[in-house]
Image: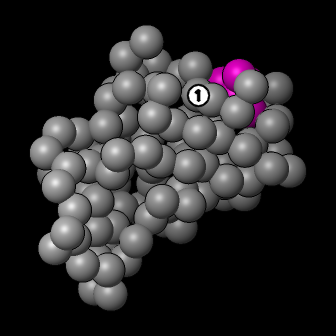
Amino acid sequence: MQSNLNCLDYNCAFNKSSHCYASHIKIEGFDATITPETYCDTFRDKSSFHLSNYRGETSLTNTQNISCSATNCKYNINGGCSASHVEITIENASCETFISK
C-alpha cells in the first residue's frame, strides 16, 4: 500500500521540502490517546545530526516503512501503519494522523 507522508517539522534532518527522506520512520506513543502524546522517533535535529553518510534519494512513501507503537490508534495494524496519508507536525514532531480507536 502506498502512503503519502508529509513532514512539517523543518528542523528534522530528514525533511526535504516537506517530504521524509529517512529509510524508515518509527512513531512512538504506546499509551497515546491524543495526537500530542505521539512523536516521530526517527526525528533528528538538523543542527546536530549530519547526513553526510546518508544516501536516501527518494522520499518515504511506503507504509511498510512506517512502524507505530501507538496501540490506541485506529491505523495501527500489528505495529504498522494503515493510513493512506501520514502527517508529522511542526510541534514536537507528533503524528497528526493519529485517531484514537
How is this picture coloured?
one colour
> Residue sitting at 45 percent across and 54 percent down?
89
**Residue 74 located within the stretch drawn in magenta:** yes
Residue 50, position as x, y percentages in the image:
24, 78
> Residue sitting at 32 percent across and 87 percent down?
48
The reply to whether residue 3 is in sight is yes
Residue 5, position as x, y percentages in the image:
36, 35
Assign a secondary structure to mark 1: strand
Compared with 78, 6 (above or below) is below
The residue labelled by disc 1 is: 81
The amino acid marked with disc number 1 is Cys
Q: Is residue 40 toward the left or the right of residue 43 in the image?
A: right
**Residue 80 located within the stretch drawn in magenta:** no
Closest to the observer, 53 or 48: 53
Residue 81, position as x, y percentages in the image:
59, 28
Give the magenta part as a residue range: 73-77
Q: Residues within 10 Å of mark 1 (few under 14, many from 20)?
A: many
Tally the marks: 1
Locate the C terminus and report the quarter of the image it occupies: top right
